[in-house]
Image (spheres, helix red, strand yellow):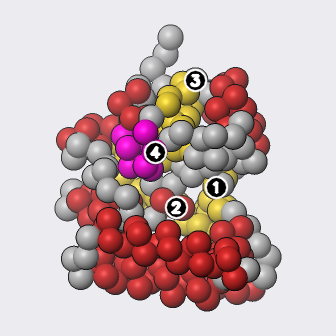
Amino acid sequence: MKTPLISVIIPVWREATNIRPLLVSLADWREAGHELIVVDGGSDDDTVSLARAGCDHLLLTSPGRATQMNAGARQATGAVLVFLHADTRLPPLAMERLAEFADSGYHWGRFDVRLSAQRPLFRVIAWFMNVRSRLTGIATGDQAIFVRRSVFDCLHGFAEQPLMEDVELCRRLKRISGPYCINEPVVTDSRRWEQNGVWRSIWLMWRLRWRYWRGESPEVLAREYRSDVRQAHVHS
């Protein structure tokens, strides 16, 4: 069997609504010889049964996105690892762009992002996310971070912390090279922005990132994040 160039690693938890449409959208990746790995963190819905037929490997781990992505990376055989959220869709030319990345001198990268809702405000939010990422060299998980397997292994993967694991990895990756930025955007479901309130979500994430940059514990920030999201659902 030919070794795949790309391994797409998808951490999931209670994603019964999203996982099957996502894997269907990636069926041509498997046909092209790439690898799909789904890592479930203890779902109590139909996520696992719905994912089983649509991926190359289905792993069961303890919950925690960093833990799940590291487990997927250990299983992966591709030269390039792509970390993809279940509510995010890759653009049509993603395979070609990642092949170009593999032939470049860069060691990691990310896609631009677009939110699925059509309201102009969501286009503005995505624009700011993309600009911020270009200026800082920091990507978030919504941007489908990708990295050479050799580099990921050298850095010992994601820090197994409950929040900001994507930011923490990017900080280390920046010491090796700047990000390879793909202009064609991934499309991320705007559902959680709408459920939690757009302005509330913006304020929460900027505040948490600022405090993380100032050195606050990811565990403390994660508790505040979960508390704020619960309150948003109660008042929605």
Q: Earlier in the sequence, mark 3 or mark 4?
A: 3
Q: Position of residue 229 (x, y in %)?
A: 57, 73
Q: How far is disc 2 from disc 4 in space, using C-alphas?
A: 21 Å
Q: Residues within 10 Å of mark 4 (few under 14, many from 20)?
A: some
Residue beneath disc 4: 63
**Residue 73 % position (x, y):** 39, 35
Alpha-carbon distance for marks 1 and 4?
20 Å
Q: Secondary structure at mark 4?
A: loop
Q: Are marks 2 and 1 in contact (CB under 8 Å)?
A: no
Secondary structure mostly seen in the magenta stretch:
helix
114 displayed left or right of 218: right
Q: Which residues are magenta?
A: 62-70
Q: Amino acid at mark 2?
A: Gln
User: Residue extending furthest right?
Assistant: 118
Q: Of callouts 3 and 1, which one flags the residue occurring earlier in the amino acid sequence?
A: 3
> Which amino acid is tagged 3?
Asp
Q: CA distance from mark 3 to mark 4?
A: 21 Å
Mark 1 or mark 4: name the one nearer the start of the chain: 4
Residues marked 3 and 4 touching at CB (< 8 Å): no
Q: Is 137 above or below relative to 56?
A: below
Query: Which residue has dot 2 on it?
Result: 143
Local crowd size for mark 2, using a 10 Å CA cut-off: few (<14), some (14–19), many (≥20): many
Q: Which mark is residue 88?
A: 1
Return the x and y of residue 224 as percentages of the image width and height: 43, 75
> Is label 2 in a helix, a strand or a loop?
helix
Along the horizontal axis of the image, is 65 left or right of 198? left
